Image (cartoon, rainbow, N blue to C red):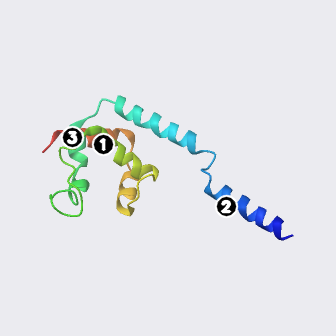
Amino acid sequence: MIATAIHRAALAALCLAAPPATAFSETSDADQRREAILALTPDAEYGAYLSSECTACHAEEGGDIPLIHGQDREALIDALLGYKTGTRSHDVMETIAGRLGDEEIAALAAYFSEVN
């Protein structure tokens, strides 16, 4: 009886430690979405139009909030997708990125990668 309880506890621990069965397809979906955004022709002017919400916090260097002006386009896309999909954690950024579509992510990344 005790051995059975120990086996059940061990099995439960293994199940909780294992990644979900969908982890592979989620990664694949995220990679496909990233590639789709990179394939878009970004509209940096549209990104400039959208940027005011971003620059409200990301405007000054030296604070706790990173400066995003002049950052690599792909790094910005990865960050926004990470917040949107929940692989990166920050309450405010998850809310903001969650509202962005692919074209908006591409436009913002293009804009911020071009400005200093």
Work out whether mark 1 precedes mark 2 in sequence or the reverse, and give the earlier one: 2
In whole angstroms, how far apart are the C-alphas of marks 3 and 2? 45 Å
In the orientation shown, which residue stands out farthest toward the bottom? 2
Q: Residue at x 40, y 49 (%)?
A: 82
- Mark 3 or mark 1: which is in front? 1
Report the side of 24 relative to 10 (left or right): left
- Mark 3 or mark 2: which is in front? 2
Q: Residue at x 25, y 56 (%)?
A: 53
In whole angstroms, how far apart are the C-alphas of marks 3 and 1? 9 Å
- Is the residue marked by circle 3 packed among few (<14), some (14-19), or many (20+) residues within 10 Å? some
- Is the residue marked by circle 1 packed among few (<14), some (14-19), or many (20+) residues within 10 Å? few
The residue to which callout 3 is attached is 113
Closer-to-camera residue (49/65): 65
Q: Position of residue 96 (x, y in %)?
A: 35, 55
Which kind of residue does numbered mark 1 sit on? Ala
Which kind of residue does numbered mark 3 sit on? Ser
The residue to which callout 1 is attached is 75
In whole angstroms, how far apart are the C-alphas of marks 1 and 2? 36 Å
The residue to which callout 2 is attached is 13
Asked which secondary structure carries label 2, the reply is helix
Report the side of 94 relative to 47 (left or right): right
Which kind of residue does numbered mark 2 sit on? Ala
Work out whether mark 3 precedes mark 2 in sequence or the reverse, and give the earlier one: 2
In the orientation shown, which residue stands out farthest toward the right? 1
Asked which secondary structure carries label 3, the reply is helix
Q: Quadrant of residue 76?
A: top left
Closer-to-camera residue (91/21): 21
> Are dots 3 and 2 in contact, CB under 8 Å?
no
